[in-house]
Amino acid sequence: MKILISPPESTVKQLLLEAELPTLDITPEKLKTFFACEVNGEVEGVVGLELDGPVGLLRSLVVSPRSRSKGLGSALVAYAEGVARAKGVVWLYLLTTTAERFFKRLGYEGIPREMAPPEIQRTSEFSTLCPVSSVLMVKQLSVNPTLKPTSHESEVA
């Protein structure tokens, strides 16, 4: 397995469309923080990040049907978390309609949507692309003693 940084737009969009995930806001700029998993020369999965200081959004995780249940999704999430952590992200959020159990196994906790910080509320994923029925989840990646606690810190700690 090989991780690719900034995979081709057509590849990302194809995988997302096959999984019925949104592609409207996929731009060359956003692709700079997308990562793909390549197996035997074929892209089998992608994941993206949107970063805003100590807050980040994990988005658009998809693994092709032929490669599911092989650990690729977990590997992509771990890689994205490592990048986010290295860039100073303390809280990583995501929205999901179908993978809540998967993300719980990776340490994410569901929280009420109204507890999303402004940085997450401003993303197109939160504000327009994902249905309001999507579950908002969060994971604390690191401890930053200079960061003021958020209103949900006691909920997820």
Image (spheres, rainbow, N blue to C red):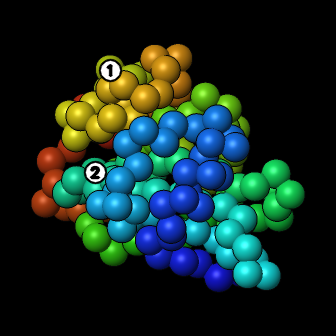
Callout 2 amino acid: Val
Between the C-alphas of marks 2 and 1, the distance is 16 Å
In the figure, is residue 87 to the left or right of 34?
A: left
Q: Quadrant of the N terminus?
A: bottom right
Q: Nearer the viewer, residue 76 or 156?
A: 76
Element marked by disc 2: strand
Q: Position of residue 23 (x, y in %)?
A: 48, 42
User: Can the viewer see residue 148?
Assistant: yes
Report the residue at 82% width, 51% height from top. 65
Judge whether 133 appears above or below 127 on screen: above
**Mark 1 residue element:** helix
Q: Residue at x 65, y 82 (%)?
A: 2
Residue farthest to the top, as pictured: 133
**Residue at image point 29% right, 61% down:** 29
Kind of residue indicated by mark 1: Glu
For label 1, count other residues whose C-alpha is less than 10 Å away and answer few (under 14), some (14-19) or many (20+). few
Q: Is residue 138 visible?
A: no
Is residue 113 shown above or below 94? above
The one nearer the camera, 120 or 138, is 120
**Residue 13 x %, y %:** 55, 51
Looking at the rendering, which quadrant does residue 45 occupy?
A: bottom right
Q: Which x, y percent locates residue 40?
A: 79, 82
Which label sits on residue 153? none
Label drawn at residue 114: 1
Q: Nearer the viewer, residue 113 or 153?
A: 113
Residue 55 badge: 2
Q: Position of residue 102 (x, y in %)?
A: 69, 45
Residue 141: name its quadrant: bottom left
Q: Count the numbered circles shown.
A: 2
How packed mark 2 is, by other alpha carbons closer than 10 Å (few <14, some 14-19, many 20 or more), is: many
